Amino acid sequence: MISLWPCVWRLLVLALAMAALVLAPIPGKVLAILTVLQLVFRENFPFSHYPMYAGFSDRTYLILVTDEHDRLLAVKSVFGISANFLKGIYDRELRRHAEERQWAGKYCEMPDLARPGQRVLQFLAGLPAAEGESAPRRKLRLHHVNYVIRDGAFAREQVCVAELAA
Amino acid sequence: MKGAFPTVEFGALEIGAMRMLFAYAVFRLAIPANVPFRAQPYPVGVARWLDLTFLSRPACYPVLKIFAWIALGVYAAGLERVLTTAYLFVFCTLLGTLRNSQGTIVHAKQMLSMVLLVQCVVYTTAATRALGEGRSMFHETALADRLAVLWSQEAILAVYFTAGLTKLIHSRGRWLRQVAKIPLQILKTSEQFHHDELKPVDLGARTTVATWLLHHRNATRTLFGLGLLAELCSPLCLFNQTTMLIGGAVLLLFHRLSAFCLRLHFHEAQMLLGIYLVNLPGWVRAMVPWQDYGLASR
């Protein structure tokens, strides 16, 4: 059964926000219109509903890209994109992989991360080399790093999930 | 009550300073050296209907970039605001759309584009009105300049207000409880920061900070909860110039906090807050006596 509560909650928050803007002694017509447009159009540039850090859980993860000797590569200098952007690409591939496998659990707990990892490395290999990047590399490796809160402390687990000949 | 808010006045010099600083912000932050994306596998926005990969062609982007530099120069000089804001808005929007069509969303340049959008709307409306009144098509009044600043302030504040509402919507009202888990993000973003350019990061010190926050959950909730409060109360900045300064300074302070904790700098947001909300040239104009020597806009 589909729950209506998220939709009702969204409308309730929006209605309260608009009521507050109407009642407040400020000029806020443009602000109100842009707020509604941003919440409606969500991630369609230049609109955004800014969902970063809107929810938190007991675990998080990141990815690291290394060469064949497991030396960390400076992704901004080598590929021209940030590590955060790269993680977004990995998230996309995890979602795609979860849909293909019909995985209902958390994406990062999927047992087989090789395929999404491979796709991320292929994405990287398809990017033009950044200026000044000349270090020879035979392979690219992608490592999945989990951070979890365990017994009131942080635990870090790293595993290499994919490798691609450069 | 709607008519009770004080009118915010801006001087001509102050508006000129804002325009030049905004042009500098766009120049520094919104015009990359090159565009590495040769495909748009997950199109968003106008990329659903348009193939934007032409932006990454070596023969195309440098030309568009030069036009953008020229437009910025003309805009900063206070000339031809309609065409320059329109061109810069389209240019920045297409670049941002192509970047966000790679399958992941970057929240970096939306605020700049929104400010360009509202300024373009203001100047186009003023020019159309002037044309309707039989004046030059590009006749723009000082009123349009002031309105452009006011609407830019509202566009900036709309970003913070939206971000605050999304936190409530997405977490279904449980954000304050969940934010106690933010220390994990401190470790993650520190490692990602190091991965960017291999710049040294004191992971030991950052782990100490994260551990302290993990073990003092209510302090963490209070600290970051104040940030949410600042976002939700951001429209109140519009009350007058003093609240604009205070609100701008508070939001800047939280940007510094997130830069320290999460390595998230949001440079364009910080610059726009400084230019349009904190507005130091305006405070100088308001405090020194030469404000009355024909410098205030008429």
Image: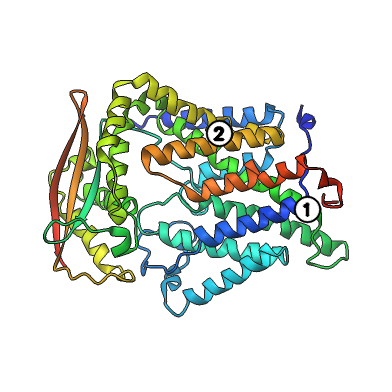
Residue found at the far front of this picture: B289
Q: Amino acid at mark 2?
A: Val
Between discs 1 and 2, the one toward the N terminus: 1
Q: Residue at x 52, y 71 (%)?
A: B65
Residue A95 or residue B178, whichever sits in front: B178
Residue A39, image x, y percentages: 51, 41
Residue B124 or residue B256, whichever sits in front: B256
Residue B120 or residue B230, whichever sits in front: B230
Q: Amino acid at mark 1?
A: Ala
Q: Residue at x 19, y 44 (%)?
A: A145
Q: Is residue B52 left or right of residue B87?
A: left
Quadrant in which the N terminus of chain A is drawn: top left
Name the residue that disc number 2 marks: B250
- Give the distance between the C-alpha atoms of the residues marked 1 and 2, in whole angstroms: 27 Å
For disc 2, the neighbor class at 10 Å (few under 14, some 14 to 19, many from 20) is: some
* Above or below: residue B233 compared with residue B36: above
For disc 1, the neighbor class at 10 Å (few under 14, some 14 to 19, many from 20) is: some
Residue found at the far right of this picture: B134
Q: Residue at x 70, y 45 (%)?
A: B150
Q: Is residue A10 left or right of residue B220?
A: right
Residue found at the far bottom of this picture: B59
Q: Which mark is residue B12?
A: 1
Q: SS for tag 1?
A: helix
Q: Is residue B144 left or right of residue A102?
A: right
Subunit bearing disc 1: B
Subunit bearing disc 2: B
Do callouts 1 and 2 mark residues in contact (Cβ within 8 Å)? Answer: no
Q: Residue at x 55, y 49 (%)?
A: B271
